[in-house]
Amino acid sequence: MNELQLGLAGVGIIVVVAVVVFNRMQERRFRRKTEASFGEQEDILLKTVSGRNEPVLVSLAEPLPEEIIVEAAVPVPEEGLPASVDPAIDYVSWVLADSPIIGSSIKEILRKQPVFTKSVLWLGLRKSDHHWQEVMRASDDTEFVKMVARVQLVDRSGPISARDLSTFCTMVQHVAQPFRAVCPEPDEARAQAVELDEVCAEVDVQVGINIFAHSESLAATQVRALAESIGMKLMKDGMFHKYDEAGNTVYTLSNYGDEPFDGTTIRQMTTHGITFLVDVPKVKNGLEVFDEVVSGATKMAQSLNAILADDNQKPLSPAGIAAIRRQLEQIYKRMQTFCIKPGSDGAMRLFS
């Protein structure tokens, strides 16, 4: 390379450096001008979004840490949930797979899971007919295209704890290997559980209508005859039950005292009072059932020459009965607000 070429190369390098320096100076000058006009702005593309509502997709390629690591947000799968899963009262996680999940393999994995304090239901969507089936009841050669696991948010012992939710999520992730697990935000589920528990505490009531003798005791045989005339049956628990077509108890009739009714001794038994009882959230068409109970209790009281009364043995007037009915209306409206259908499978689970 001669001196002319070396000189030209040197000049070229100087020009390039000068352009770069000039551009940097212009960029800094423009940034200072912008900051002076608008103040320092946060880059929204780098901002961490908190309080997301979407479920998260968890990678299971590596051993799971104690906390859930979120890699990406994904929507809940489009297929409808099984009938035995209710998002109003259940925390639901999905197991997604690119290839069929074999029944024998997944059942073996589930058997190895440690005992969990809450009842967990695993259901799979069968590849053959796209019907949901309880995984542990499926045949070993069943193929599932995906699965769901549900744990109940609330029961009569209270709302599920944050610790139990975390344990459940970790268990789902372990079961999902080498597939993918979709776990909704546990903190939001915990808040939902606490709120739901408060509602359940408000509506978890029983309505009782008593029939008391005026003076003489009531003959248990008369009580049995009248109870059977309105379709009630004496059961082993010592109470008469009225059942619906599905075999669920609609309301009961029990002795007001401590002694239960017993088919072997009922001929010799007498009582001062009896009680019709309705478990409000566990009854479908609750207002109609209440009206039926009032009608049956009124007729029974007339036949027994007795009175309808409250727990303080004070006569129950039509106005008092109407007030109870209005309270029931409010209870059922409250349940409807939280998508709890009285007498549904979900309600039975919540109030069992």
Image: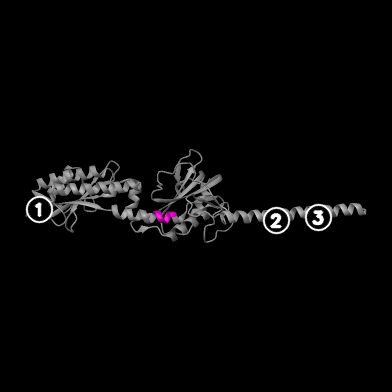
**Residue 23 or residue 313, whichever sits in front:** 23
Q: Mark 3 or mark 2, which is nearer the start of the sequence?
A: 3
Give the distance between the C-alpha atoms of the residues marked 2 and 3, in whole angstroms: 16 Å
Q: Is residue 112 visible?
A: no
Callout 3 environment at 10 Å: few (<14), some (14 to 19), or many (20+)?
A: few
Q: Which residues are magenta?
A: 188-192
Do labels 2 and 3 touch, CB within 8 Å? no
Q: Outermost residue, top direction?
A: 129
Q: Which residue is mark 2?
A: 25
Q: Position of residue 127 (x, y in %)?
A: 51, 40
**Residue 127 or residue 91, whichever sits in front:** 91
Residue 190 among magenta residues: yes
Q: Position of residue 228 (x, y in %)?
A: 18, 44
Do labels 1 and 2 touch, CB within 8 Å? no
Report the amino acid beneath label 2.
Answer: Met
Question: Label for residue 342?
Answer: none
**Residue 139 or residue 230, whichever sits in front:** 230
Please indicate whether residue 109 sits to the left or right of residue 8 in the image: left
Q: Which residue is mark 1?
A: 213
Q: Which residue is mark 3?
A: 14
Q: Mark 1 or mark 3, which is nearer the start of the sequence?
A: 3
Q: Secondary structure at mark 1?
A: strand
